[in-house]
Image (cartoon, rainbow, N blue to C red):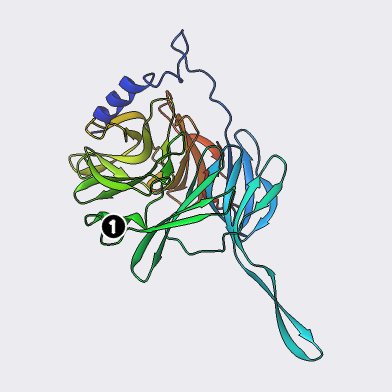
Amino acid sequence: MRRAVRRVLGAIACVAGTGCGDSGAPTPPPAVKIVFLDDLVQLNTLQSGGTPQLTALTNVLPFAASRGAIYYLAPRVVVAGDNAGRPVLTITDSGGLRRYHPESGMVDTFPLRYFDSQAFGAATNDGRLFAYTTIDNDSVHLNTFSLETGERRSVNVTGTVQAPASEQIGLATPTFSPSGDSLVFLLPNFLGMQMLVYEPRTGRYDVRLLRVQVTTFYEPLQGWPRWTARDNSVRFLARLKSNLQPTDTLAVVRIFPREPDRPNEMVYAARVPDSLSIASAKFYSFSEDGNTVVMSVATTQGKTGLFAMRAGHGTLETLLYDGRVTPRYPLLIP
């Protein structure tokens, strides 16, 4: 089984067009910058080849990213005090959506209160629109929020799309098209994989069945899919299967939202070494072109590190492995 998987890796090693030069030798991979939470729930930044740098942000949840910035949810902060012997509670921060610029350290605040969500969100490349899902009294809502005007729109999709898609939307992380005119949710289930396409401007949406064989070939992982401009495809990270059983190989798979009848394609892949537990791989995120994906993976001893998988390279690249730090929610900054 491993020999067959390695033959596949060799065949696609240079297909992506970014991993090999004219001589056939791998070209140096571009640097990536990510954020993650450490053991003390403090936000760190990390550039490949460097060491983690602490930020001033703590107790926040990385939620989405767009060019040069990340979006996070800040919790409401209530401070207990005393006024003439009487206890007083003071709200020092109402919480909600924030945008952090790692290069400058600046934080933008938006009039969107803190909300509970069981999935991550998405932002357009131009930083004008933000999308997320909420579940309220067994109702699933698609929400968009204008980062320019503060306008919020919400669509209740419960009972209006075919099962099991309606239940999964609230658990799925969306991705915007490069132009920001469409939003896609990938919904793997026992039927295979469905795709919900939502148009924020018109409020229209529909669910389609994709030709992705998740029961026989792919096991999608949890993370942030990416809709790339280069080939107008949505890429996600999955664990390869062989004879219905999971293998030791991770693969980036692409589907084509504008061409729902077009078969899916495996773009690039990498074998996970025996020292790492492939079952622990999760919380992946992509570069803007989709040719680099970052994820957290634990060793067989239970220590978690951050690793990159790149087009044209058949192995994982170690970004951070320090037994003293357990990085969580790694999010690549495009």
In front here: 161 or 304?
161
Considering every residue shown, the one lying at the far front of the view is: 202
Left or right side of 81 for 11: left
In front here: 174 or 280?
174
Left or right side of 85 for 277: left
Percent of width and height locating residue 257: 32, 36
Q: Dot 1: what SS?
A: helix
Left or right side of 264 for 47: right
The amino acid at mark 1 is: Ser
Q: Which residue is mark 1?
A: 166
Percent of width and height locating residue 140: 35, 61
Percent of width and height locating residue 321: 56, 43
Q: Residue at x 40, y 37 (%)?
A: 273
- Category of crowding for the residue at label 1, using alpha-carbon neighbours closer than 10 angstroms: few (below 14), some (14–19), many (at least 20): many
Considering every residue shown, the one lying at the far bottom of the view is: 85
In front here: 154 or 318?
154
Percent of width and height locating residue 265: 29, 29
Q: Is residue 322 visible?
A: no
Q: Quadrant of the N terminus?
A: top left
Asked where in the image residue 155 lies, by quadrant, the reply is bottom left
Considering every residue shown, the one lying at the far right of the view is: 84
Q: Quadrant of the C terminus?
A: top right
Q: Is residue 168 visible?
A: yes
Q: Residue at x 50, y 34 (%)?
A: 287
Asked where in the image residue 30 lies, by quadrant, the reply is top right
Q: How many marks?
A: 1
